[in-house]
Amino acid sequence: MRTKVLEIDPLNINIEIIKQAAEVINNRGLVAFPTETVYGLGANALDPKAVAGIFEAKKRPLDDPLIVHISDISDLDTLVEEVPPQFHKIVDRFWPGPLTIVLKKTDKVPDIVTTGLETVAVRMPSNVIAKEFIKAAGCPIAAPSANLFSRPSPTTAQHVMEDLEDKIDIVLDGGKTEVGIESTVIELVGERVIVLRPGGITLEELSSLAGEVEISMPGPLDNTPGKYPKHYSPKAKVVLIPDTRDQKEKTLHVIEALGNKGKVFGILAKQEHAADYKNANVKVLGPVNDSKICASRLFGLLREFDSEGVDVIISESIPEKGLGQAVMNRLRKAAGPLENFLNFFHPHN
Ligand code: TXA
Ligand code: MG
C-alpha cells in the first residue's frame, strides 16, 4: 500500500481530512496520528483483525499489550468493567492528558489488544487532532507508539514515515508533538497508585494529588511496560555518564577513550556542558533544569544520531526530577543493562 501523509493544522482542523482517516479505521485500516506525547499507530480497538495489522506493521511481539485511546469518559463503558475508588479524582485532574490507567476489562475488548490480560490500559489524549480523530472514528482506538519495535518513539510525522512508510494507510501530520515522551502508565490497586512506566505526568504531579505513589520495576516475565530490556533503543550503543559533579571530566575521558579506539561517536550533552566538548559531534538535550525541553528533544536526537550512523552515543544523565525521571528511564533502556557503563570504565572485569 502507499502511505498518504495528510497535513493537518491543529489550530484550524480540516474536518474532511479527519473524516478520511476515520473511514480508513472503519475499513480495518491503520492511521498514525499525533498525540501530545508521541505519534500513535491506530486501529479500531474492538476489531481483532484491524488490531492484528498494528502488530504486523510494527513487527511488535504479540505479548506486548496496547493502549486504548478514548475521546469521552462515556467510552469507558464498553471497555471497562469497574473503576477503582480514586479513579475519578485522578482523571478529573489528568484527563485528557499523558496518563494511561490500567483497568479491569470487559469481554468486548479483544484478547489481541491486551495480549490475554484481564486488564486494559486506557488513555484520553489531549491533542486536538487525536480527539477529533477518535470521535469521528466512533470507536475506541488501540494505538502503540508509531515506530518499528525497538526504535525510539516518533515525535514527528517524518519519524513515522522512516519506520512505517507503505506499511500503513495514513499519517496525520500535525507537526512535532509537545511532550515528546510517552504517557505515564499507572495501575490503581485499592487505595494504592502504582507507576508501571514513568512518562508525561510526573511523579510529583501524581503524588501531589494522590499521596504517596509506588514505582513498580517490571521483571522479565511481567506483562508490564519495559519488559523488553532494549525497548527504546537506537541503533548505536548508548553509554550513560552519571549525573555527578565530575560528569564533564568523565565525559571528556570517555570521548578520549573512544577517539583512541577510532569509534564514530556522538554526545548527547547538557546545554551547560556542550561548549566544552570541542570538535566532537555534540547535540544539546537541554538545560539541566528544564526537563521539559530535554523530554521533547530526546527521541528526535537519538534518531538523528542513528541516521548519521554513529557507533556510540555518549549521553550525560540529567537529574531525575520532573520529566527527568521519564527521560532517564528511556535512556537507561536505550543503554541496556547497567553493565555497559561499568564495563566501559573497568574493561578488565
Ligand atoms: O503516550 C503514549 O502512551 C503513546 C501514545 C501513542 O498514546 N503510546 C505508547 O504505547 O507509548 P506503547 O504501546 O508504545 O506502550 C504502551 C505500554 C506498553 O509497554 C505495555 O506494556 C503497557 O503500556 N500496557 C498496555 N496494556 C497494559 C496492561 N493491561 N497492563 C500493564 N501494562 C500495559
Ligand atoms: Mg512504544
Image (spheres, rainbow, N blue to C red):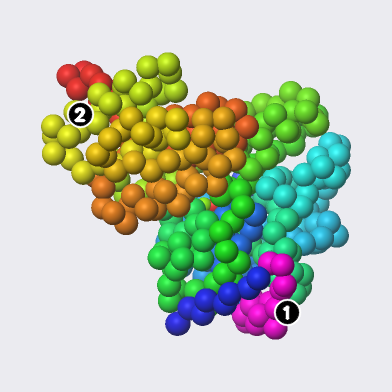
Marks 1 and 2, how far apart at CA? 55 Å
x%, y% of residue 77? Answer: 83, 58
What type of secondary structure mainly makes up the magenta span?
helix
Circle 2 packing at 10 Å, graded few (<14), some (14-19), many (20+), is few
Q: Is residue 219 left or right of residue 139?
A: left
**Residue at x 40%, y 48% (from the top left corner):** 302
Range covered by the magenta-colored residues: 10-27
Q: Secondary structure at mark 2?
A: helix
Q: Which residue is mark 2?
A: 256
Relative depth, front residue between 252 and 295: 252
Residue 20 lies within the magenta run: yes
Residue 82 shows in this picture: yes
Relative depth, front residue between 142 and 327: 327
**Residue at x 57%, y 77% (from the top left corner):** 6
Q: Which residue is mark 1?
A: 15
Q: Secondary structure at mark 1?
A: helix
Q: Is residue 172 left or right of residue 109?
A: left
The amino acid pointed to by label 1 is Ile
The quadrant in which the C terminus is found is top left
